Amino acid sequence: MPLLLCLWGATAQGACRQALALGLDVSGSVDAAEYRLQMDGLAAALLHPEVQTALFAMPEAPVSLAVYEWSGPEAQRVIAPWRVISDPVALDAVATTLRHVQRGDGASSTALGAAKSFGAAMLSKQAACWKRVLDVSGDGTSNTGPRPKVVRPDGITINGLVIGGGDGGGLDALAAYYHAYVVQGPDAFVETAAEFASFEAAMVRKLKRELQVMVVSTR
């Protein structure tokens, strides 16, 4: 369902309509080629014309964006810190960062609960935004750290993007796992990519859905 916003003149000036944190799985099931497909795929998805249209739909209330990678309980790394996406220059800067980033020292394990906690902590720094969304991508179920079903941060929506071909026991099973234990919020959803080669197209679909806006008043 589109985000329903009511703007009242000057109160909307300088506002942040949405904070969006994107967490990418870099655990042991993700090889070097798949890592590159995620980073380059996200960069291309952000620059997709329809995604740009959604991002820039309300210039008076732009989106704030951050990207991090995650694997084990103590293995999270911010790739692109919070940036207000107010114009194409800001968006190009994030895409360039993603295309040039090199894989950090992660862990082989998959700690989805810790990934959720890390993303929630990032979003806590964006309390002024009208909506806060955590976007967690992964190709497997959690096997270490806090259980994802008990990590339920308040005040944010968590969506998922599941990728087939990993340790998730099949795409449908992994999507069901994310529905049961990872996502939260009344409009939360799970997007699917059959394999890492499909990650970019799935991310385009996901971003378009997450960034939907309906302006009901501009008085």
Image: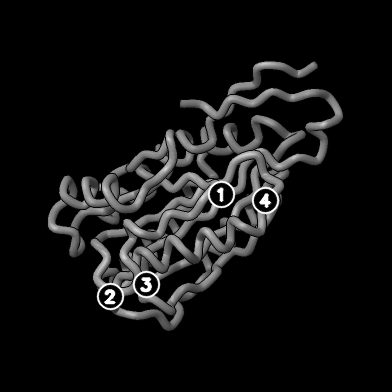
- Which residue, given by chain and number where applicable, does mark 3 sit on? 71
**As displayed, is residue 202 above or below residue 118?**
above
Specify the amino acid type for callout 2: Gly
- Which residue, given by chain and number where applicable, does mark 2 sit on? 28
Q: Gap between marks 3 and 1, in whole Å?
A: 20 Å
Residue most extreme to the right: 10
Q: Gap between marks 2 and 1, in whole Å?
A: 26 Å
Q: Which of 159 and 117 is in front in this view?
A: 117
Residue most extreme to the bottom: 105
Which residue corresponds to the image point at 77% horizontal and 34% vertical from the top-left? Answer: 60
Q: Nearer the viewer, residue 73 or 88?
A: 73
Q: Gap between marks 2 and 3, in whole Å?
A: 8 Å
Q: Mark 2 touching mark 3, by CB under 8 A? A: yes
Q: In this figure, what is the number of numbered marks?
A: 4
- Which residue, given by chain and number where applicable, does mark 1 sit on? 20
Q: Mark 1 touching mark 4, by CB under 8 A? A: no
Which residue corresponds to the image point at 23% horizontal and 51% vertical from the top-left? Answer: 177
**As displayed, is residue 17 above or below residue 4?**
below
Q: Where is residue 188 in the image (x, y as percent from the top left)?
A: 40, 39
Q: Examine the image and state in which quarter residue 16 appears.
A: top right
Q: Mark 3 touching mark 4, by CB under 8 A? A: no
Can you tell which mark lies on residue 127? 4
Q: Examine the image and state in which quarter residue 24 appears.
A: bottom left
Direction from residue 88 to residue 33 in the image, left or right: left
Tell me the crowding category of disc 4: few under 14, some 14 to 19, or many 20 or more residues within 10 angstroms, Cα based: few
At mark 4, the secondary structure is loop
**As displayed, is residue 188 above or below residue 153?**
above
Indicate which disc, 2 or 3, sits on the residue closer to the N terminus: 2
Q: Where is residue 120 in the image (x, y as percent from the top left)?
A: 52, 58
Tell me the crowding category of disc 3: few under 14, some 14 to 19, or many 20 or more residues within 10 angstroms, Cα based: many
